[in-house]
Amino acid sequence: MFPADATSTHRAVRIPGALLACAICVAAAAMAAAETRVATMDYGHLLAAAKADPLHADYAALRAAYAASPGYSPLAGLAPETRGEMLSSMAAGDWRTALAKANAILGVYWLDIQAHMTAAGAAASLADSGAASLHRAAAAGLLSAVVSSGDGRSPATALVVINAGEERALIGALGARATGRRLVRLGGHAYDRIGVTGEQGEAGTIFFNVDAPLGGHAAPIAGRPPD
């Protein structure tokens, strides 16, 4: 899905089938209508609905509502110490601690994709299939909302994110790692141009629209940016 850099002969980074399927399941009509729903449903109501039923939440509208809310912060849920403990506990197989740290992050910022993914894995390892399923649904829904916003091939079709955590989560879900980042300003918009390397060593570039984190809301969070 994501192309290699136009100046490179390397192959594109490939999105796993599960993530593609997740993106495809989001209807284009729902994405186009999300901005209208945000106007009538505030972030608090959308968040409460998502927590009550993560399997059927409107994650596109939820992200848009949060970015437009007075409490929006691109640093929400950053918690570097707690996040570090969460990841190190997960790597060490300390599922209970990893789950507790993930829930601590989600208690502050429920839209944190990495925390949901960690909580899903830890809960599954603790044989709590119910909690694992709900966290997995939240992570998939949030990732799908990001993927449905663009294809990342160019600034014109950049993936729209509301914080750097969404960039990291998507790159991680691709099984890739970031190799470089450059801020690009073009046509009144701001973009992160991130070089990535895939699991097989393939190199590529992903463009993210970062208008929201940098203080602007020019790009529609809920759908594809305008041509």
Image (cartoon, rainbow, N blue to C red):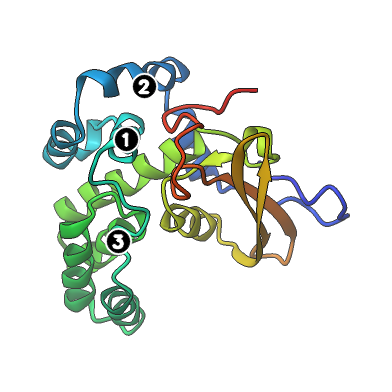
Calculate the distance from the C-alpha at mark 1 to the C-alpha at mark 2.
Answer: 10 Å
User: Disc 2 marks which amino acid?
Assistant: Glu
Q: Is residue 127 above or below residue 150?
A: below
Q: Foreground residue, 201 or 66? A: 66
State left or right for residue 225 relative to residue 67: right
Which residue is label 3 attached to? 115
- Mark 3 or 2: the one toward you: 2
Crowd class of label 3 (few under 14; some 14 to 19; many from 20; radius 10 Å): many
Disc 3 + disc 2, Cβ < 8 Å: no
Secondary element at tag 3: helix
Secondary element at tag 1: helix
Q: How many marks?
A: 3
What residue is rendered at 27% in x and 58% in y?
Answer: 120
What residue is rendered at 41% in x and 29% in y?
Answer: 222
State left or right for residue 40 relative to residue 2: left
What residue is rendered at 62% in x and 36% in y?
Answer: 188
Q: Quadrant of residue 32?
A: top left
N-terminal of the pair, mark 3 or mark 2, is 2
- Mark 1 or 2: the one toward you: 1
Which residue is label 1 attached to? 68
Q: Is residue 65 above or below residue 78?
A: above
What residue is rendered at 59% in x and 45% in y?
Answer: 190
Crowd class of label 2 (few under 14; some 14 to 19; many from 20; radius 10 Å): many
N-terminal of the pair, mark 1 or mark 2, is 2
Calculate the distance from the C-alpha at mark 1 to the C-alpha at mark 3.
Answer: 22 Å
User: Disc 3 marks which amino acid?
Assistant: Ala
Residue 35, numbered label? 2
